[in-house]
Image (cartoon, helix red, strand yellow):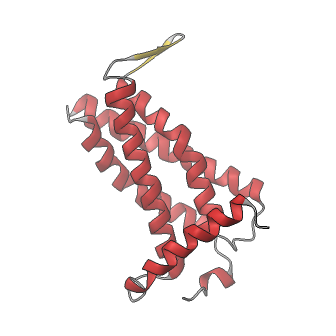
Amino acid sequence: MKSIHQRIKKNILFIIDIIYPLFKNFLSLQTFRYAACGGVNTLLDICLFSISYNLIIRKHDVTIGFITMSPHIASLFLAFCITLPTGFYLNRYVVFQQSGLRRRSQLFRYVLVTLICIVLNYILLKIFVDYLGWYPTPSKILTTFFVVVFSYTSQTFYFFKASVTDKNLKY
C-alpha cells in the first residue's frame, strides 16, 4: 500500500505531466515542473498574503512583544509560514527528485534561499508600499516577479543542483 506522500506526489506529477506536452517545445520537463510547482506555490503565497492583509490583520499594525510590524510585512511573514513547507515539498519530491542531495542538505539550502527571498520581499515591499505609496497586493505581485528570477536561478544551479540524469530527463 502506498503512503499518502507517494500518492500525493504521484497525483501532482500526473497532472503536471498531462499538461507538459503543450509546452515541451519550449521547456524541458524539469523546468516545466519547476514553473508549475513554483507557480502554484507563488499563487498560494499571493492569496495568503492578500487574505492575511485584508481579512486577518485587517490592515492594522501588528505588535509582537516590542516589535511592531506594518500590516503588509506581517502578512508577508504569515504567508511565508505556509509556503515555506509547501515549496520545499514540491521542490524536493516533484521538481528535483534526482538531485542526489540528502533531505537535510536540501532543506538547509532551501531555507537559506527562502530566507534570502524573504529579505528581497521585505526590501521591495518596503520600497513599493512605504516609500512609493503603492497598494500592498499589487506590490506583492510585482515583488514576486523579481524574487522568482532569483529563486529559480539559485535553486536550479546551486540549492538543488541537478545531477546529470536530472538534466537528461525527457518526456
> Which residue is found at the position 34% from the left and 47% from the top?
143
Left or right relative to 147: residue 168: right
Q: Position of residue 66 (x, y in %)?
A: 52, 10
> Which residue is found at the position 54% from the left and 10% from the top?
65
Q: Position of residue 102 (x, y in %)?
A: 78, 61
Q: Is residue 93 above or below residue 170?
A: above
Q: Is residue 161 above or below residue 113?
A: below
Q: Residue furthest front?
A: 1
> Which residue is found at the position 29% from the left and 36% from the top?
127
The residue lying toward the viewer, choosing from 43 and 31, is: 43
Q: Position of residue 63 (x, y in %)?
A: 46, 14
Left or right relative to 81: residue 57: left
Q: Is residue 51 above or below residue 150?
A: above
> Which residue is found at the position 76% from the left and 53% from the top?
104
Place residue 51 in its image quadrant. top left
Q: Residue furthest top?
A: 66
The residue lying toward the viewer, choosing from 167 and 1, is: 1
Location of the N terminus by quadrant is bottom right
